[in-house]
Amino acid sequence: MDNIELIISLDKTLSNLCLKFNINKDSSVISNTDGVKIIKSSLDKIYLSKLINLNFKDKNIYASIKDELEGYNKSIGFISDGFKVYFTDDTIEMYSDIIMLLEKKRLLDSFRFIKKIITLKQLSKYEISILDGSKKEVILEDVISYITGDINKSEVNELEISIDNFVKAYGLFDSVSVLSDKICASNNSKLIINGINNCPNLKDKIISLMKE
């Protein structure tokens, strides 16, 4: 099944866990007249985890989106080609361990993808945004924007590695422009970091990679 959107919510009227599958194309397995089917179930974590892992199998999670799902107070979503899963409201805490594992996979998939694009020299602009309270990654044509909130040590390490790979592919920086919250560095491509004040180590890293 392609293009599946799985919304995990705790419907107060049903007092039950509901899985809503929004299908963008006809399916003999999950379909009805309006393309939406709600399945009432008392799914446990093991089954739900297997269901999600099956749909993400052999796919990169290229985005995690927070609080953007209409109709819910809170939501956390993970997106790959052909599959989206959203945890909403009370289910965010209920399935926090699954969310944590998905977030780890997203980060690993993200950095692998970035490394591949940089190594192949298919990146004309690499943009990193380090913004508090937001976790989202956007890939648009030749621009990769990696956005994270509450950046941790392992993420900083991966970002430093990606900057090293960027310089290996495109050469040392010819020029660097530093503002209070932004840094721009140019070589045969361009690197931009928004919110550099949230991670000053990266500023020092970039300056150290300028041509003498």
Image (cartoon, helix red, strand yellow):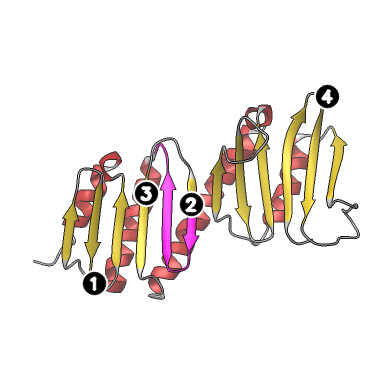
Q: What residue is at 42 percent from the left and 56 percent from the top?
A: 145
Magenta includes 4? Answer: no
Q: Position of residue 206 (x, y in %)?
A: 22, 56
Which class describes the residues within 10 Å of circle 3: few (<14), some (14-19), or many (20+)? many
Q: Which residue is mark 1?
A: 171
Determine the secondary structure under disc 3. strand
Q: Which label's residue is closer to the chain start, 2 or 3?
A: 3
Q: CA distance from mark 2 to mark 3?
A: 9 Å
Determine the secondary structure under disc 1. loop
Q: CA distance from mark 2 to mark 4?
A: 34 Å
* Amino acid type, residue under disc 3 in the picture: Ser
**How many numbered circles does the render carry?**
4
Magenta includes 143? Answer: yes
Say if 15 sits above or below 196 in the image: above
Q: Which label's residue is closer to the chain start, 4 or 3?
A: 4
CB within 8 Å, label 2 to label 1: no
Q: CA distance from mark 2 to mark 1?
A: 26 Å
CB within 8 Å, label 1 to label 4: no
Residue 100 sits in quarter = top right
Q: CA distance from mark 1 to mark 4?
A: 60 Å
Q: CA distance from mark 1 to mark 3?
A: 22 Å
Q: Main secondary structure of the magenta part?
A: strand
Q: Which residue is mark 2?
A: 137
Specify whether residue 109 is in view: yes
Determine the secondary structure under disc 2. strand
Disc 2 vs disc 1: which is toward the camera?
Answer: 2
Q: Which residue is mark 3?
A: 129
* Amino acid type, residue under disc 4 in the picture: Thr
